[in-house]
Image (tube, rainbow, N blue to C red):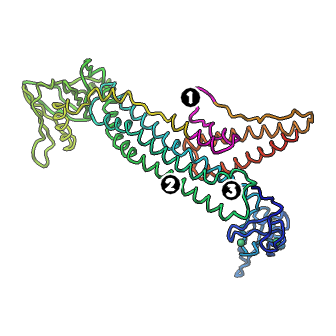
Amino acid sequence: MEVQAERILCAFCKKPMALYFCLECKSLFCENCAHIEVRDYNFCGECHSTDLRELKERKGDQETIKVVCLDCRSAQIKTGKKKTQLCPACEKKSFKNISKYQHYLHMQYYEFCKQLLIALDLLYPFVKKMDWYRDRVLTLRDQGYFIYPLLESKLLEAYLSFDTIKQKALERESHYLSNLRQYVLEFLKKKQINPYKFKEYMEKLETIELESSLYRRSINKLLERYTELFAELEGPLNILDFYRERFENWKEVLNLSMKEVPLCNLPEIDCTGSSSSLSLKTGRGHLFFTNKRIIFVGKKGLVSKSATKFFELPISKIVDCKVDKGILSRKALLKTMNGTVKFSGDKKILTTLVKYIDFMKDWKNHCVRENHIEDLRRCEVSLADIKRKVDRDIQGLLPSKYHQLFTVRPRFRARSKRVIRPRIIPRIRNQSNNPALLKKIDALKREKYALLRTIEALEAKFRSGGIPKEFYLQKYRTLTGELYQVDTKLDELNGTA
Ligand SMILES: [Zn+2]
Ligand SMILES: [Zn+2]
Ligand SMILES: [Zn+2]
């Protein structure tokens, strides 16, 4: 039921009409009952600015204080009386105009309706990220980098369990929706918001706010273990990328055969000698490991520094590799069937060399199985069902004039080929012949169009992480407030047109 603004009684004089609502003590009061506090204040006599500052001036031992205007530097300061209205009950300044506060509560509710999108907003970047990791893994595998076999199974698990996550997210969304529904009648129309119940409404909105944060938190919680998983993938993928880059840089010299699998590589190691039976070329270079051989490559020539292969040894000829015992030793011996090769360098590099040789001899156990790759390739996660549900919920909750703000979601537009344009122009019921009125309507329409675009752009910016949430919310509230006013005006004008 609508409460006529003119009939709202002041809590103090018991007469209509109360204009203000105190946020502190929640009382409604009228213009006449508001307390007036009169205070002296200083202002600039030249430009009326109140931006004043005290300046210390020193003349000999005397220090005088001079007040100047920060805007025009004038020292002609005058004093005036400033009247401030205060709440008659608690003497606080924090009160709001009743009509504006109705509007605020109404918009606040609308804002909370938007929170239905939380599930979608949080899951979407997630799916994107999961797909991104999948692409990275598959690209590496397609290029023949098969070590770190767990990447696929971890990602597979993430894909397969995502349906459960979606299910749970939808449950949370439904729960939140039921909260919104409970109060929908009270908040849907600004005029229906009864000022006598402001206090109650504030509490209701607080409940909804709490629910929305629970909703957000629970979904973040659901996604937590995926965040951990992504972090686990990052390390191995970076290492694989590093190997790939080096194999890529030296590919002409390495000349891998079709069935040869690149495993890993060790940059900057010194080969210092070999048995006379082998008589290999020595020097500083990079050691590459494949499933078939080790290849030692480096740069030759003082001027041209052309890439060259120093030597290669087939895996079948390699017996083992050991770091020389002794704390100060900087040598490792690679034993082959035909003799030994000496490497020297930092102990850490030498231990890695030993590790890589062992790894290479047992490479099959460190490589991924093909079927996992294919399974992963087939995985697909879609959020279309969640989007449909949320859209439906919003449509069921709010009148159509709000829908466009929800359904025009720039981020989702890219995926679907269909471009949804907001319905900007409300149908004019009667064509009027009044040109002034039509001009006014036209201007409002343009304003509305601009506002919708700005809101869209703001949302896009927020989603891409370009602006902080506080800024977004603040700006968003102002814009939707303006939009609401333009809408109301348009409705009025269209009614008279
Ligand atoms: Zn009064
Ligand atoms: Zn008060
Ligand atoms: Zn001034």
Q: Where is residue 162 in the image (x, y as percent from the top left)?
A: 41, 39
Ligand 2 occupies quarter: bottom right
The answer to whether residue 67 shows anywhere in this view is yes
> Which marked residue is nearer to the observer: mark 2 or mark 1?
2
The answer to whether residue 311 shows anywhere in this view is no
Compute the Cα span from label 1 to label 3: 35 Å
Residue 224 is left or right of residue 406, and the answer is left
Q: Is residue 496 above or below residue 188?
A: above
Disc 1, disc 3: CB below 8 Å?
no
The residue segment tinted magenta is 390-419
Give the main secondary structure of the magenta stretch.
helix
Query: Residue at the bottom extreme?
Result: 61
The N terminus - image quarter: bottom right
Which residue does the numbered mark 2 point to in the structure image?
214
Label 1 crowd bin: few (<14), some (14–19), many (20+), radius 10 Å: few
* Number of numbered discs: 3
On whether residue 418 falls in the magenta region, the answer is yes
> Which marked residue is nearer to the observer: mark 1 or mark 3?
3
Label 2 crowd bin: few (<14), some (14–19), many (20+), radius 10 Å: some
Which residue does the numbered mark 3 point to in the structure image?
105
Which residue occupies the foreground of this view, 164 or 371?
Answer: 164
On whether residue 83 falls in the magenta region, the answer is no
Residue at x-position 11% and y-position 38%: 322
The answer to which of marks 2 and 3 sits earlier in the sequence is: 3
Which residue does the numbered mark 1 point to in the structure image?
416
